[in-house]
Image (spheres, helix red, strand yellow):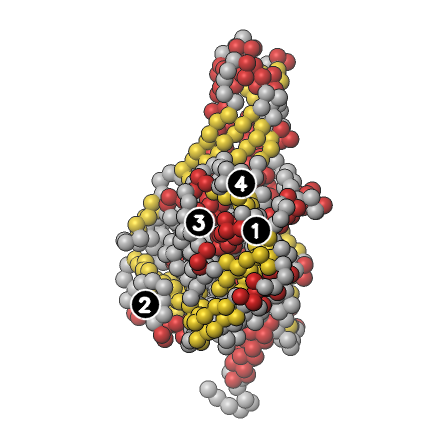
Amino acid sequence: MRIAGQAVPHESAREHVTGDALYTDDLLLRFPRLLHAWPVIAPHAHALVKALDYASALSEPGVATILTAKDVPGEGDSGSNRHDEPLFPTEVTYHSQPLAWVLGETLEAAQRGAARVSVDYEPLPSILTIEDAIAAGSFHSAPLKLARGDASVIESSPLHFEGELKIGGQEHFYLETQCAIAWIDETGGVAAHSSTQHPTETQEVIARVLGITRNKVTVECLRMGGAFGGKEVQANPWAAIAALGAWKTRRPVRVRLTRALDFALTGKRHPFLARYAAGFAKDGRLEGVRISLYSDGGWSLDLSEPVLSRAMFHCDNAYLLPAVEITGLICLTHKTSQTAFRGFGGPQGMLVIEEVLDQAARRLGLPPEIVRERNFYRDGDTTHYGQPVKDAGRIEIIWRMLKESSAFDQRREEIDRWNARHPFFKRGLAITPVKFGISFTATFFNQGGAMVLIYRDGSVQVNHGGAEMGQGLHTKIQQIAAEGLGVDLERVRVMSTRTDKIPNTSATAASAGTDLNGAAVADACSELRSRLAEVAARLLGCDFSAIHFSDGLVFPNGEEHRAIAFARVCDAAYRQRIPLFAQGYYSTPHIHYDPQTGKGEPFHYFAYAAAVSEIEVDGFTGDYRLLRTDILEDVGESVSPLVDRGQIEGGFIQGVGWLTLEELVWDSKGRLATAGASTYKLPSWTEVPDVFEVSFLERAAEAGTIYGCKAVGEPPLMLAISVREAIRDAIAAFGAGGPILLESPATPERVFFAVQRARAERESQVIPVGATR
């Protein structure tokens, strides 16, 4: 029976719901004499540190020591590329930035000690908004640019207009906050448990800070309680502090951020400001567009350049841009360093083009879905960075199938009739597509490794470079290994991710976890299966090529009655001195990109999808209710349909949160005002549509991927754009049909004022009795 493709539960589902699943902070009892770390944080967004006095802290009962810059034997910086993230800064560059760390016998002792540290500051002016950064010329790097054709066609187009769109950020709000435990092992090396998406980079940063080689550092990740990109590079400083504390004291050290600290210290999804000019033909076809993207990078560079690059790559979404100029700039502000978040810039870029198309549709008096259809990529088209849009026809296939299955046209008519009867409540309907490129845009990250071990009893251990954050990667790996060896799922155990098992791994990100690690596991299993087939052929007296593995049995093709147990073959292989372990490796083929020319093929393939959403808006309050969503997604040939369905549903709801509810607000001092669940609104059961239909595109296997599957982690988030556009459609029903300006997120307050503007526009167009135009 085929195991890859079965709808099986998450491999840790039972442990998740019973509380038996262990996370980093659950391991404290394994470490006697553990010390707890707590930061000394700055009350300014921007200031010079004139002096730091910690004598009083050291006299506090229970305080073991304090970590400062003088304790660093190597490099006191955790920055990924530019090395611009000092662990012990002399210049404060965001509010609540840690300046030193107190280690205590208890957490309470460390907190008391930190409160007794005296710091003398010289406050400096701060930059807190994108607009202020633009005015001050405060940027992290030179502009990035992409272009095709002659964008001057905009000015001669029958319809041309300009506009801007503000796009808010988003807090990751993973259930498990940032956490690490480090200790000195029996060899004098450093070991760490870390809640990290990138154990190899965490290993690298620890080694750098301690001034030792990487082979003396081992990082392990059991599992993460969510990450969403927030633990790709931003897990590194906390692990480095824990390792530094262990190095200094020779005792285990734990760093765990409380929810309040996690909000205050960690980066978010990048807020964007987009300014655009666009030209359209009268039938709604785009002739040219000019887009300037400004991202709020915060205090350090972090991953802001690749995030901005992906936003620029995805300013097309599913649409042909015949003439385009895109410029991107990363603003340097005195706020948390914004970082990776599910979609990695793609959602922001896609939102901009959807805004442009809707503005054009309403100016032309055309239905937005018609304008979208007329601008779809077709087979043979290439993107604005020169990559052929493989399987572009799937966009229209998905669109047509979804409109039919959701009864889109019929419901459009029903909503028009409903709106005519309800002056104070209006309903809106929208359909939006997704085309999302899959691969790391930095080509060298597109590789994965694995080691598969088979024991004499036929049981299997799998080690691979991907990290489990609840997304079901280990479940898919387990299915791939079971399929590859022809054994039952229960025979396969996927081990925790460790840098001493698989070296030089890539981050579990970019929706590439299964593509890279799954293919590496399959490679190792293929090698082992070939070795075992030779042993089985001798046992069964048949040709090597006739051997078949299935359901834990081995037999010649078509002769199941002669089957022998997989375990028997494994034991025989051991006795014949045939190795029962193998390494696997995979690198994504045929991808390349030249940032100097802005041309190449950075993506292995594109994931396609579309969503239809229906909304009801309350004209009195701006509140709204999501009535129904229908999704059709191209997941290729799903390795694990239940896991993929969960990813689609969860990703969509997370996107709804970003676009309609979750608003980050910083006060005039640079302090995050929405700093907890009481002030930061997360989506909940009330945001789940009353009717929620999710389907997979059938017969859609992707050639050249593991078992024909496609990535499913990030693409669903952008389907939530359909909700934003349905809200806009409902707002338009209060007005006279003109363009609707709506910042993101579309909170009830913003919706209310948009409704007021639409009503005012409508009233201004009412002709008094007896009057003429």
Please tell me the numbered disc located at residue 185. Answer: 4
Of the two numbered discs 3 and 2 on the same chain, state the one appearing first in sequence: 2
Tag 1: amino acid? Val
Of the two numbered discs 1 and 2 on the same chain, state the one appearing first in sequence: 2
Tag 3: amino acid? Leu
Please tell me the numbered disc located at residue 581. Answer: none
Report the front residue among 356 and 79.
79
Instruction: For marks 1 and 2, give the CA distance.
Output: 60 Å
Instruction: For marks 4 and 1, give the CA distance.
Output: 13 Å
Instruction: For marks 4 and 3, give the CA distance.
Output: 15 Å
Q: Residues within 10 Å of mark 4 (few under 14, many from 20)?
A: some
* Image marks 1 and 2: residues in contact by CB distance under 8 Å: no
Of the two numbered discs 3 and 1 on the same chain, state the one appearing first in sequence: 3
- Say which quarter of the image contains residue 12: top right
Q: Residues within 10 Å of mark 3 (few under 14, many from 20)?
A: many
Instruction: For marks 2 and 4, give the CA distance.
Output: 64 Å
Q: Residues within 10 Å of mark 2 (few under 14, many from 20)?
A: many
Q: Is residue 683 left or right of residue 206?
A: right
455 shown above or below 301: above
Tag 2: amino acid? Ile
642 shown above or below 47: above
Location of residue 573 in the rendering, given as x and y in whole percent from the top left corner? 54, 16
**Residue where numbered disc 1 is placed:** 253
Instruction: For marks 3 and 1, give the CA distance.
Output: 15 Å
